Amino acid sequence: LVRYFQTEVHLPNRKEGTMNALRGSIVIIVILGLIVFVSTTNSSAQELAKEQVVVYGMPAGDVGPVDPVGPGSVAVHTAPVTHHVYDALVRHPIGDGSSPEFEPDLATNWEVSPDKLSWTFHLRKGVKWHVGFGEVTAEDIVYSLNRSKNSKVSAWRANYANFKEIKAIDKYTVQITTAKPDPFLLSKVANYYGGMIVCKEATEKAGAFDRLLGLTKEEFVGTGPFMFSEYKPKDRIVLVRNDDYWKGKFIIEKLIFRYIPDAGAREAALLKGELADTLGLYDAKWIRFMRSKGLIVTPLGPGDLKALYFNLTVKPLDDKRVREAIAWGIGQEEAVKQQGEEISRILTSPVISDAWGHIDAGWAKYKKRDPEKAKQLLAEAGYPNGFTIKLFMSTGPWFLDKMVLYQGLLREIGINLEMTLVDDPIYQANVFKDLNPIVIKGGRYALATYWLRYFYHTESIVNTPKASNNFMHYSNPEVDRLIELAETTFDKKAQLDSLAKVQRIVVEDLVSVPVVETLLPDIRSPWLDLGYEPKSNFITLEEIGPKTRILKH
Amino acid sequence: LRAYIFRSLGRALVTMLLVMTLMFVILRLGPLDPAHFILGDYATAETLRNLRESLGLDRAIYDQYLVFLSKMVRGDLGFSYVNKLSVLSQLLDVLPYTLELVVGGLLVGILLGIPPGVIAALKPNTIFDQILQLITAVGISIPTFVTGILLISTFSLHFDLLPAIGGGEGSNLKSHILHLILPAFSCGFLMMASIARLSRAALLDVLKKDYIMTARSKGLAESIVVLKHALRNSLLPLITFLGIYINILLGSAVLVEVIFTRPGVGRLIVESIKMGDFPMVQTLLMLYAGTVVVVNLIIDITYSFVDPRIAFK
């Protein structure tokens, strides 16, 4: 072809003309042939596999309680399961969980009263519960949200404390009245944690208002696109397609969640084609290797924000100069180098960059480490020779790799971290018992108010009645006031202003030091065609959408 | 013999009771908090307290222990804290997988260990013997988890012959066998090496004995000398070893089950410990302890059949 087009252009004689015509025909035939070839290979690639089964490699040993009021509704070992079984009044758009917009789900539309204290939701008619529990009515919604608010085992009681009354106006209308205005109410009735709706009849029959629902067909009942079929402890959960799903049945017929805690085993199974989707390693080299094998790696948001939280009641961490020395001593770039740029973001604020209300509050100045500055600050604080600090550390790779890195970096400035390694559940238990002077912790909230409330509000101090993640014992009345204002005002400008102020104060007080923001390295086989563009979600693995399908492979 | 068995049973029961009590106390004094695992990081102190109350974890340890004992006596193993399913049903679900693995490992060890050992003993210091010594040295030095990973990368990923993970689909026998081959080899490889060495040494030792010389001088065929006189006598140390090895196999099975993501008792224990699922951990560890005790008992009794000279005093 190249030689043909390189032939000099001149007026042809008759013989040349015939030759040229012949050449032309050959070229046309070749091009047509190519087109036919490409289109047939494409069409065969687009052909569906006989079995439309998605096998997930779950990066955990077993599932947790499959109950919206349990913590599993946000945890990696359970969220991908519950997400496909339960619906909610509204839902996060598929593939974009960080979006501040919500889509109608069990509710078709809703309105807020002028005083902003009352929300009315109009329900979709004819939505059926799995396994014959009849139609979804306002009673189910009232029961379910009341359970999130009042059940003795609800991990989310604090989040629903502001719901003063939840009542059924008629069979298809629900009204939620709040004690204080709540501009973020939709996030609490969305398909995430306590917002997922359970079946009143099934739950009452099981006597499970005050206990967590079990993994049985009688108790694990939702209205979503898939329904529970089988559970083999520490091995797998199988969901089958709900053919009566109100949006119409999905292409995928079955979801199998296989529990594979060992990363090596997940990798082997993925390379062998035994898994469709799993969570990859936080390692740039590994990601490159898997891509070279034809697998698709998608960095998924919202980012996981990791930071070091200092107990301000412990010496010498009560001295801001010491904390700043640590910030300069570790530098965010070091963690980025460790896990690779593709899945890393430099933190600019104590809330994740995807969160609504996030601003650049100045954390990025600790991007590049500066050991000299760190030593100088330590000397000013009265520790020219550094100090030793003892802490428990989780053997979970998501923390340990960073802390081992920091142990080396901090030793350079004279700070000696003496870490006692414990299994992750013990580490988690210990930090909530206030046993660690420095806590490394991550989280993936897409709402700035949640971050700030859980980590920086006085009420969240560990070992107190409403304890949450305030490991620092940080108590700043101005911060509390601004968080509460942001939580209650519908005035977007005032809300953003107060959120911005809190972030600046927290960075100024430097009660926590940035580690890095990490996107999840989701990895899937090329034959899993999601049918949407994955950007972010809360279930750690890819969601199954109505157009998701398995291609022939 | 009967008195011996009764005495052994008595000792076994006391051992089990001690193990059970120790486990119970250690689990509760340890740092694991089941309520925290079940309710997660964002649970409030109040909900954690509520759950501990409903699980009975707020009571004094001796009080909890009495409840546990009385249930044990009635054969009630309780329910998992995490998934609310009966401990017994979960155990019965996975037990066949572990038995498959242990039996598979034993078969690999015995069938591939004894014959080369015997041949090497009959032809000592030949090239065959040298090669066997080398292979067994390698076999003994490589830990089970390394063997497992090497087998997966070679036979699953490189040659694509066998599945990489899992324990087989449903009741499909072919799938179960295909899923068993690599795990059984990684469990049995170490054993095969040890058995080959042991059977070689034991047989060499016996072949030097006077009665073998007598048998040979009687003009018996060499095959009868070896099979009837020498091999039977060299089995004794092997049986002791097999007893110890079944216990080691149960330990290796935990690792192999994790590496191959096979369902099984080992994985059930590991994950239950991580989750602080006390009822599961208690029962499963009891099962392990019980197996060790029973296997030792069986080995003691087997001695008498193999070598009637051993008297039970």
Image (cartoon, helix red, strand yellow):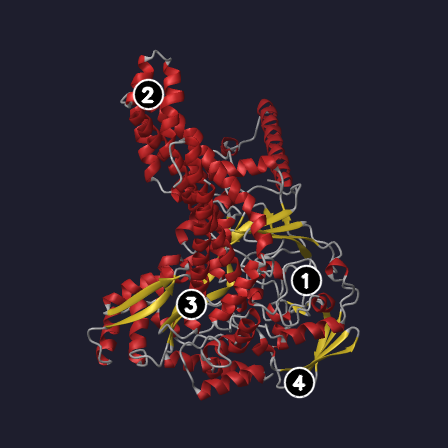
Mark 1 vs mark 4: same chain? yes
> Label 1 is found on which chain of the structure?
A
The 10 Å Cα crowd at callout 3, few under 14, some 14 to 19, many 20 or more, is few
- The Cα atoms of the two marked residues, 2 and 4, are separated by 92 Å
As drawn, the label of residue A219 is 1
Q: State the SS at label 1.
A: loop
Residue B273: image location, x then y, percent: 47, 59
- The Cα atoms of the two marked residues, 4 and 3, are separated by 48 Å
- The Cα atoms of the two marked residues, 1 and 4, are separated by 33 Å
- The amino acid on which the numbered mark 4 sits, given as a three-letter code, is Leu
Which corner quadrant of the image does residue A410 belong to?
A: bottom left
Mark 3 vs mark 2: same chain? yes
- The Cα atoms of the two marked residues, 3 and 2, are separated by 57 Å
> Label 3 is found on which chain of the structure?
B
Image: A123 above or below B302: below
Image: A249 above or below B214: below
Q: State the SS at label 3.
A: helix
As drawn, the label of residue A117 is 4
The 10 Å Cα crowd at callout 4, few under 14, some 14 to 19, many 20 or more, is some
- The amino acid on which the numbered mark 3 sits, given as a three-letter code, is Leu
Please state which of the two labelled residues, at mark 1 or mark 4, is closer to the viewer: 1
Q: Which residue is mark 3?
A: B29
Residue B190: image location, x then y, percent: 38, 37
Q: Is there any visible trace of residue A298 in the rendered image?
A: no
Q: Which residue is mark 2?
A: B122
Q: Is residue A151 left or right of residue A525?
A: right
